[in-house]
Amino acid sequence: MGHAPGTKPTDRPHFYGRRSGQTLGPRRRARLEAILDRFGITAADLPDGNPARLFPAATPVWLEIGFGAGEHLAAQAAAHPGVGFIGCEPFRNGVATLARLIDEADLGNIRIFHEDVRLLMPTLAPAVFDRVFLLFPDPWPKTRHHRRRFVNRENLDQMARTMRDGAELRFATDHADYCRWSLARIRAHGAFEWTARRAADWRDRPADATETRFEQKALEAGRQPVYLTFLRRPGDTQGA
């Protein structure tokens, strides 16, 4: 399944989200460029498809898909200096905010893929991630846009392929329909086991997680986020 490490997908996936917002001022732009010079990566930087090579030996690697403004990613990196983090985000202004957080906290264990994660994942070797975060992705609420939702069979296949046995997938959303959609598809896939045993397991934010801007907006608007945690089942289970 997928492409060999170091190769590129033959068809570039269509990206529907924003790539930039307000024009960055000279200071923010300079800091963004400096951080990307130090910590930005492309698939070409991983000829063997293994992101662990970007960090010291024996470092576990965690992936955050669509890190937004980077609050959660930066907090996780600060709390886990022995973990290497790959953050993927096409939105330039969000990456610029993460650049400030990296600079202020002097974080050296983050690498930034400033593009759609779907361009990176097919180039990776199998079983390279110990944890994957997918937090508050765009729910694309209109029925005609549901095909744009990130949680689909193809992306779940890629996540399953690149996660180690026992690796953790954390998903969060404040959109009830997207929660039902995602839970049904992830559980039906076959490679993931939902860990919830009681209501608090999906109602309460994980103890080591940091509130994001999207989550804060949801709570202020009276929407209750849902936090779903799954474990990658052992074996090559690519479907039910």
Image (cartoon, grey):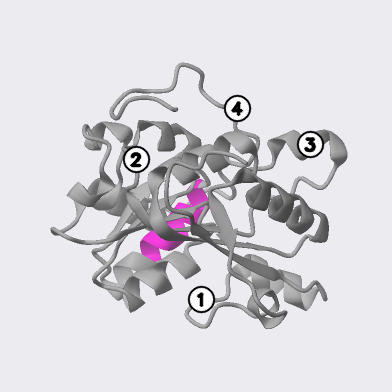
The residue under label 3 is 145
Mark 2 and mark 4 residues within 8 Å of each other at the beta carbon: no
Q: Residues within 10 Å of mark 2 (few under 14, many from 20)?
A: many
- Rendered location of residue 83, percent (x, y): 28, 66
Label whose residue precedes the other's in the sequence (3 or 4): 4
Q: Nearer the viewer, residue 84 or 95?
A: 84
Residue 116 makes an appearance in the image: no
Q: What are the residue bounds of the magenta stretch?
A: 92-100
- Secondary element under disc 1, as helix, strand or loop, is loop
Label whose residue precedes the other's in the sequence (3 or 2): 2
Residue shown at 32% from the left, 48% from the top: 128
Q: CA distance from mark 2 to mark 4?
A: 24 Å
Q: Residue furthest right?
A: 143
Q: CA distance from mark 3 to mark 2?
A: 30 Å
- Secondary element under disc 4, as helix, strand or loop, is loop
| Magenta stretch holds residue 95 | yes
Specify the label residue 209 is tagged with. 1
Which label sits in the foreground, 4 or 1? 1
Residue shown at 73% from the left, 34% from the top: 147
Q: Nearer the viewer, residue 239 or 142?
A: 239
- Rendered location of residue 170, percent (x, y): 54, 63
Q: Residues within 10 Å of mark 4 (few under 14, many from 20)?
A: few
- Going by the numbered disc 3, the residue's amino acid type is His
Relative height, residue 84 to residue 164 (above, below)? below
The residue under label 2 is 126
Residue shown at 60% from the left, 33% from the top: 15
